[in-house]
């Protein structure tokens, strides 16, 4: 999930945020866990809390949803009650991964949180639920020297057996997705089991605690993710990053090697391993891994963006625009890239293009804070205020 710079190659200390349609056949290798090195966490890391149905959720189901469930059926009534603007008014927000009860209480969540909350309601109503991991173009974000790769999940709901005499099959399932996709795009899905969804939730929590510098909690969340689904490789990568950040360099290698034993071309584990080998003084091995990584990933995430930022600092707005454009070509829906493209266009005096790019930044922002930030700058631009780069 994250990145750090070394000579000859930009490598990433990377983690995956958010799948093995078969149940786990064996627990995660116990030698990978070293509990004594980490303080116990006060956070509730139990699998039961992920889909737990709160009293507030039960009250909403019993009272506010009753008429829609009766008139539209359980499946459509549920979706309308949760996602129509006149009803619960949920918002997409990627700031933190929430469990079902938290997403309901906050009226917001990322795609995984909204999937979990919707599934909790569906199960309470006796609706069949199927989860899917969706193959999408890579979307990266970063915080400090940590880089995050975001995955995507959705779910499909069947009709309740009490409302339909038909057998539950693919033709009866309705897919619900909480992220806008390009018109006409064809999604490729992999059906995943609920224990994998739980592992995704826990891995997200591990990454978020890692980002906050809470290494003890990050360890326990990553450990719990692997106990939930030992085949969920992203959590091994996270565990390796936790060990490295904790200063346990020799312990960090095994989880990363485990990932590469299953997926030899996994660039996240490979980039983290190259950094680790350098830390361990094994430069020759690190160089070999880095060389393989460069062949698989010649232009790492944020490469063009960082070059564009250098051009912006030098006042070369034309070069910056071209470089930001290359980053957008491979990550069309990341808000930060559109924001800086707007600034480059503003520097070139193209106010129309600047407004358009800022509008895209607002449209693609994933937190309330970012939406407010970009909206305020769009308002400034409409008033032809001084350069926005000075305001951020």
Image: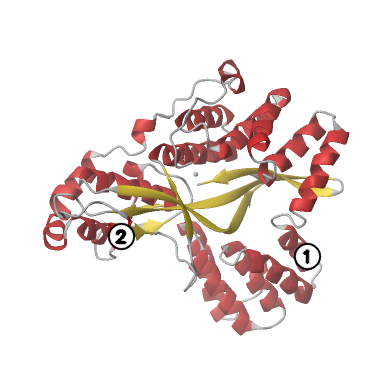
Residue at image coords 68%, 37%: 260
Residue at image coords 62%, 81%: 353
Residue at image coords 69%, 46%: 267
User: For this rendering, which residue is in front, 141 or 195?
Assistant: 195
Helix or strand or loop: what does disc 1 sit on?
helix
**Left or right position of 278 against 146:** right
The percent position of residue 21, horizontal first and vertical second, equals 45, 42
Quarter of the image with the C terminus is bottom right
Q: How is the image coloured?
A: secondary structure
**Left or right position of 263 against 171:** right
Which residue in the rendered view is the most extreme toward the top? 36
The percent position of residue 119, horizontal first and vertical second, equals 31, 47
User: For this rendering, which residue is in front, 130 or 54?
Assistant: 130
Look at the numbered discs 2 and 1 and tell me whether their residues touch, using CB distance below 8 Å: no
Helix or strand or loop: what does disc 2 sit on?
helix
The percent position of residue 60, horizontal first and vertical second, equals 19, 49
Spatial distance from mark 2 to mark 1, Cα to Cα? 55 Å
The percent position of residue 39, horizontal first and vertical second, equals 54, 20
The quarter holding residue 54 reads top left
Quarter of the image with the N terminus is top right
Could one spot residue 168 in this view of the protein? yes
Q: What is the number of callouts on the image?
A: 2
Tell me, for residue 141, which label it has, or none.
none
Tell me, for residue 313, which label it has, or none.
1
**Left or right position of 342 against 81:** right
> Which tag is nearer the camera, tag 2 or tag 1?
2
User: For this rendering, which residue is in front, 219 or 167?
Assistant: 167
Precedes in sequence: disc 2 or disc 1: 2
Give the residue at mark 2: 171
Residue at image coords 29%, 44%: 120
């Amino acid at each position: 999930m994250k990145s750090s710079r070394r000579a000859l190659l930009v490598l990433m200390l990377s983690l995956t945020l958010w799948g093995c349609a078969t149940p786990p056949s064996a627990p995660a290798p116990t030698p990978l866990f070293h509990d004594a090195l980490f303080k116990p966490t006060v956070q509730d890391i139990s699998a039961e809390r992920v889909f737990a149905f709160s009293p507030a959720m039960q009250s909403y189901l019993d009272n506010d949803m009753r008429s829609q469930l009766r008139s539209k059926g359980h499946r459509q009534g549920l979706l309308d009650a949760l996602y129509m603007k006149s009803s619960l008014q949920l918002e997409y927000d990627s700031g933190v991964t929430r469990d079902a009860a938290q997403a309901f209480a906050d009226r917001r969540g990322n795609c995984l949180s909204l999937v979990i909350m919707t599934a909790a309601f569906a199960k309470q109503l006796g609706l069949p639920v199927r989860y899917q991991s969706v193959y999408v173009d890579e979307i990266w974000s970063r915080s400090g020297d940590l880089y995050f790769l975001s995955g995507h999940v959705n779910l499909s709901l069947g009709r309740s057996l009490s409302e339909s005499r038909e057998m539950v099959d693919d033709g009866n399932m309705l897919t619900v997705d909480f992220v806008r996709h390009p018109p006409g795009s064809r999604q490729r899905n992999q059906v995943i089991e609920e224990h994998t969804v739980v592992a995704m939730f826990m891995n997200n929590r591990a990454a978020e605690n890692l980002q906050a510098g809470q290494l003890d909690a990050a360890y326990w969340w990553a450990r719990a993710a692997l106990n939930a689904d030992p085949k969920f490789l992203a959590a091994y990568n996270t565990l390796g990053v936790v060990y490295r950040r904790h200063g346990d360099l020799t312990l960090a290698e095994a989880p990363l090697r485990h990932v590469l034993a299953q997926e030899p071309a996994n660039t996240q584990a490979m980039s983290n391993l190259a950094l680790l080998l350098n830390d361990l003084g094994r430069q020759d091995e690190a160089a070999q891994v880095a060389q393989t990584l460069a062949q698989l990933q010649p232009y790492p995430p944020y490469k063009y963006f960082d070059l564009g930022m250098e051009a912006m600092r030098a006042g070369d707005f034309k070069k910056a625009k071209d470089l930001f454009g290359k980053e957008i070509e491979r990550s069309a829906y990341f808000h930060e890239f559109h924001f800086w493209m707007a600034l480059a266009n503003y520097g070139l005096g193209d106010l129309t293009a600047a407004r358009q790019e800022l509008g895209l930044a607002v449209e693609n922002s994933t937190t309330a804070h970012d939406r407010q930030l970009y909206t305020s700058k769009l308002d400034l631009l409409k008033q032809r205020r001084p350069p926005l780069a000075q305001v951020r």
